Amino acid sequence: MQTFDPRLLATLEAVVRHGSFAAAAQELGYSCPAVSQQVAELERRAGLRLLERRPVRATRAGRILLEAEQGVRTALAAASLELRAVRAGTAGRIRLGAFASASTGIVPRALAQFQTVFPDVQVSLVQLEPGPSYTRVNRGDLDLALAYDYDFIPLVPPRTLRRTLVVRDPVVAVLPADHILASREAIDLASLAAETWIAAPEAALRLDLLAQMAKSAGFAAQMEYEGDDFNTILGFVAAGLCVALLPRLALPRGATDVVAKPLVNPCLNRFVYTVRLDTRHRPRAIDMLERLLTEEAQEAVE
């Protein structure tokens, strides 16, 4: 039975990820000939071609080995995490991932409390959307992440991850403060069909889906702006140019130039989760940070 060296699998993964032997060599600290030799050795052991060279991409056989490489990496990351938990150290580093509105709202307050309990634990933060967060936690590049999905656009994580619901984050209608509907207690989605809309890609607010849910036409035709983040959206709404749907956590506290109203028919929600590798043990510092993030998220939507 042929065996495969995990180091050779890691080289194959780097070549495919970069689409370049040279870039993979630079990342791994090898020479280009050494990378080529390692890939050739893998192909010899597999008895199959693993890469197409121009452009560089994995063959079907290569994709099988890439899945194996991911499994090895995930298993080693899980083992490392469990060993750290067994040692029960209170020093070290936690690598945290979080989406945009959590990075600006939930995370800073949670970290401020965390540092009073674990002053010797360094926390690094990278801002990521849920899909990349799942990938990086699964690869062992992150220890913990905050992620989300919507009740009308579910996102299923890999089975190797443990995803824990933190809070239900209601989606609200955001209007200019002087909008004709601003005095209503709640907003029926269909009543906004004729408005000019703005949407952000990370908010997953596809207007064709809104039209289906509201059972009303008009949403797709009225999309005049497309913002890249929640601050862009709020700026346009505040200027009276459009309306939007946003999760409540995305709204700054004390904003006076826009109004946020509960949404009815239908009610929509974003669900916020903590995500980590599914291991039996984990460091106490990660447990504490997860708990603090949960508390801050729940307080933010009250």
Image (cartoon, rainbow, N blue to C red):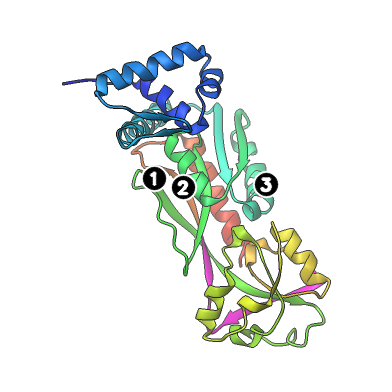
In terms of depth relative to the viewer, which is nearer, 112 or 157? 157
Q: Is residue 257 magenta?
A: yes
CA–CA distance in space, label 3 to label 2: 18 Å
Q: Relative to the observer, which residue lies in front, 49 or 277?
A: 49
- Residue 182 sits above or below residue 11 on the image: below
- Residue 55 visible (yes or no): yes
Q: Secondary structure at mark 1?
A: strand
In this view, the residue farthest toward the front is 54
x and y, in percent, of residue 280 in the image: 33, 39
For the residues carrying marks 3 and 1, which lies nearer the camera in this image?
1
Quadrant of residue 244 within the rendered picture: bottom right
**Secondary element type, mark 3:** helix
Residue type of the residue flagged with mark 2: Val
Query: Farthest residue in the left direction?
Result: 1
Q: Which residue is mark 1?
A: 161
Check disc 2 and report the residue beneath it: 275
Quadrant including the N terminus: top left
Residue underneath mark 3: 108
Q: Is residue 293 above or below residue 250?
A: above
Q: Which residues are magenta?
A: 254-271
Between 26 and 278, the residue placed more toward the observer is 26
| Disc on the earlier residue, 3 or 1 | 3
Q: Secondary structure at mark 2?
A: strand
